[in-house]
Structures are given as C-alpha cells and as structure tokens.
Image (tube, rainbow, N blue to C red):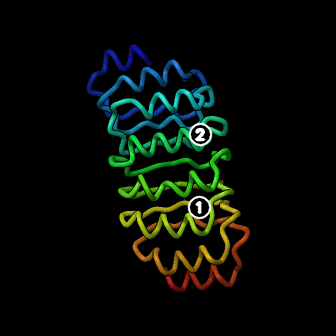
Amino acid sequence: ITLLIENCPSLHSLRMRGCQRVTDVGAASLALSSTLTTLKIGGCRAVSENGLMAIAKGSSPYATLDLSDLEMSVTDASLTELLKNKGKTLRALNVANTPRLTAPALGKIHLYGRELRKLNLGGSGRLTDEALFELLRDCVFLRRLYLTACCALSDEAIWTLMGHGKDLEELDIVSCTSTTLAARKALARELP
C-alpha cells in the first residue's frame, strides 16, 4: 500500500474490500494520501482500531468510507474520531456489521455527519429510536438509509421515519425484529 500511495499521487478511489493482508501499517500508509475520496476497506479484518485512528488523522477528504464487517476494529472511539475529522466531506458511510459500536457513538453520527447522503447501519443492534430521530432530523441530505437487523429499533423508529423520512429514496428495515407488522405496513402506506 505504501508503494501504491507513493507512486499514485492522484489516486482518488481505493477498493480493497475483504483483503486480509491490509494491516495497520497499510492503514498508516493510506493516511499519507491527501487525494483519496473513496476508501473501501470493509472486511479487511487485519486493520485494527489503531489503523482506523491513523486513517482518521490523515488528510484525505473522504466522501465515501466503507468500514463494514470490521467487527473488532470499528469502535466508539474510532468512529467518533473519523466523524470529527472527516464528517464535513463525508457523503456515504458504511459501518454495517460492526457490533462494538454502542448507542452513544451511533448517536453522534448526526453531530458530525450532517452532509451524509447514504448511511448503512445494518446489524447495529444498539441503534436506538432516539439516535435515529436525531439522525433524520439533522442529516437533511440523507437519501439512502440501511437499517437491516437493527433489532433495538421499535415502532417509535417507524413513526420517526414517517415524520422525518419523507426525502428518503431508499430504506431497508428488513429484520428489524422489534418493530410490528402493523407499523411497517403504516410506513409502507406513508412512504410509497
């Protein structure tokens, strides 16, 4: 990765999804780039929280970050650092299947990610109704929201989606098992 970053100074997009050889050393090299706008390292399980912290402190103006399936790496601290440092340019964020994230960290997305257009929180079992409300209230540009298997969301989240989700173009609430069929049907009628 170091050679790639050094030899491709104009590199804007890098997709390494599932590459098990990408480590924290590679993540530190990524932090040296100032041109990357798209970084997809979902499933690169050798990248730890330290690697994500290095990426967060780098100078690239990321518009798209895919950190999905980094079960042990994406923590409250690393997500908060990424959002604080990259939130102004971030348009798409994928943190699906990152079970170490807690409700307080998920609740901060709306503070730093106000420009988000696409957000995947699938499998975030700790996402609360309140955090979803804040997200929809403050992230006014959000058009695609994926909440697959966000089991802590209740019917209150469905009512929030009906009231604040009118601009959504894509919504995935499959396997949100704490919501009722009646609420999901009401949502389907409200947001055709």
Task: Point out the tag, 2 or 1, that comes first from the N-terminus.
Answer: 2
Closest to the observer, 190 or 163: 163
For residue 35, side relative to residue 41 (left or right): left
Which three-letter amino acid code belongs to the residue tagged 1? Leu
Percent of width and height locating residue 64: 40, 44
Which three-letter amino acid code belongs to the residue tagged 2? Val
Residue positioned 59% across, 49% down in the render? 96
> In the rendered image of this protein, does residue 87 appear above or below residue 153?
above
Of labels 2 and 1, the one closer to you: 2
Q: Residue furthest left?
A: 10
**Residue 192, visible in the rendered structure:** no
Percent of width and height locating residue 106: 56, 54
Q: Quadrant of residue 10?
A: top left
Q: Secondary structure at mark 1?
A: loop
Closest to the observer, 123 or 4: 123
Dot 1: within a 10 Å radius of its alpha carbon, few (fewer than 14), some, or many (20 or more) residues? many
Q: Secondary structure at mark 2?
A: loop
Q: Which residue is mark 1?
A: 147
**Residue 3, visible in the rendered structure:** yes
Percent of width and height locating residue 73: 61, 35
Q: Which residue is mark 2?
A: 74
For residue 110, side relative to residue 63 (left or right): right
Residue positioned 60% across, 41% down in the render? 75
Query: Tag on residue 124?
Result: none
Q: Which quadrant, please, contains the N terminus?
A: top left
> In the rendered image of this protein, does residue 148 appear above or below residue 187?
above
Asked if marks 2 and 1 touch (Cβ < 8 Å), the reply is no
Cα–Cα span, label 2 and label 1: 17 Å
Percent of width and height locating residue 23: 56, 22
Dot 2: within a 10 Å radius of its alpha carbon, few (fewer than 14), some, or many (20 or more) residues? many
Residue positioned 38% across, 39% down in the render? 38
